[in-house]
Amino acid sequence: MNELEATVVKNAGSHYLLSALPSWEVFPAVLRGKVRLKASEITNPVAVGDRVRYVQEGDGAVITEILPRRNYVIRRSTNLSRQAHIIAANVDMAWLIVSLYFPEVKLPFLDRILVTCGVYGIPATIVLSKTDLYREPAQEEIDRFRSIYEGAGYRVVETSVETGEGIADIREACKGGVNLFSGESGVGKSSLIKALDPGLDPKIGTISAAHLQGKHTTSLYEMYPLASGGYVIDSPGLRGFGLVDLEKEEIAKYFPEMLHASADCRFTPCTHTHEPGCAVKAAVDAGVIAPERYNSYLGMLEEDKKFR
């Protein structure tokens, strides 16, 4: 039986939708059992964005092999088991959606996602959403947020689906690639995707198949084609983001501003916590490295201990 290749564009637990990108003709598929067993340490052996091999069986398809991933975004829920969950695979850009308010941004949460993107070589852009709701009374907080993350080397885009601010820039940047949109619940991710392409409705879903009806929609991961070009992956709102496969000695390497400063540390390796002559701590004291970022780093070191 001939094996064909396609990309996973929807994950609904044990059922999937595939399409042979760049063509957009979706069809249902299930996963062969032995493939599932190979990835038993991962809660989802197949992720949206995965390239897979499959064989046709009846009206659907059976996934027989997951092809090597170019990259992926993976998380561990900090209050559950040691198992990890792959959010998306083969991503060209991660758009990390945050709102200063409604809901209030949690910087340690954002920093964990940024570190994970760095580990797997995924470019990340921070999207500050809903700015029309708080710009006037909170311009100082916006400026502080931008200084923290632009100072660390990240791009920050301010957006509002009400005024259209920033939407055209993101739409243009999404062309020609696979873009992951991720963030905490309530940050306006689905509204932003719909603003990029009014023909989409991520809350309802433009892709449908009879075998997927009645599934729990809160766990769905789905890719959409943008009319302007490129693809977006919509992921459920996240509540926790634990690091996976990262030794504590490596964490600082994925804080770009700390990595730069660490070249001048007296000792190598340096944990940037207690060593004399630590250039990172000196940079924090001097205001060159934001204390918010340094505190996130310390929190990750402490979290690492809990999982050992």
Image (cartoon, rainbow, N blue to C red):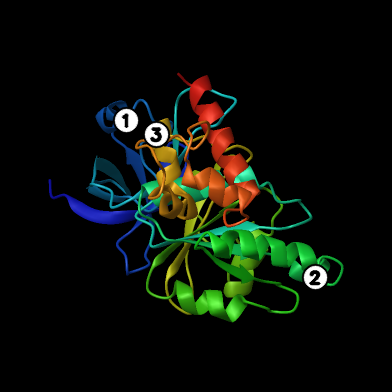
The residue lying toward the viewer, choosing from 149 and 97, is 149
Query: How far separated are the C-alphas under marks 3 and 2?
Result: 39 Å
At horizontal 71% and vertical 58% (from top left) the residue drawn is: 99
Residue pointed to by mark 1: 39
Left-right relation of 143 to 285: right
- Is residue 75 depicted above or below 174 in this figure? above
Which of pointers 3 and 2 lies earlier in the amino acid sequence? 2
Residue type pointed to by label 2: Arg
**What secondary structure is found at the residue carrying circle 3?**
helix
Name the residue located 50 percent from the left edge and 46 percent from the top edge: 280
Q: Which residue is mark 3?
A: 249
In the foreground, 82 or 276? 276
Residue position for label 2: 135
Camera-side residue of 184 and 227: 184
Q: Secondary structure at mark 2?
A: loop
Residue 89: image x %, image y %?
A: 37, 50
Q: Which residue type does callout 3 highlight?
A: Glu
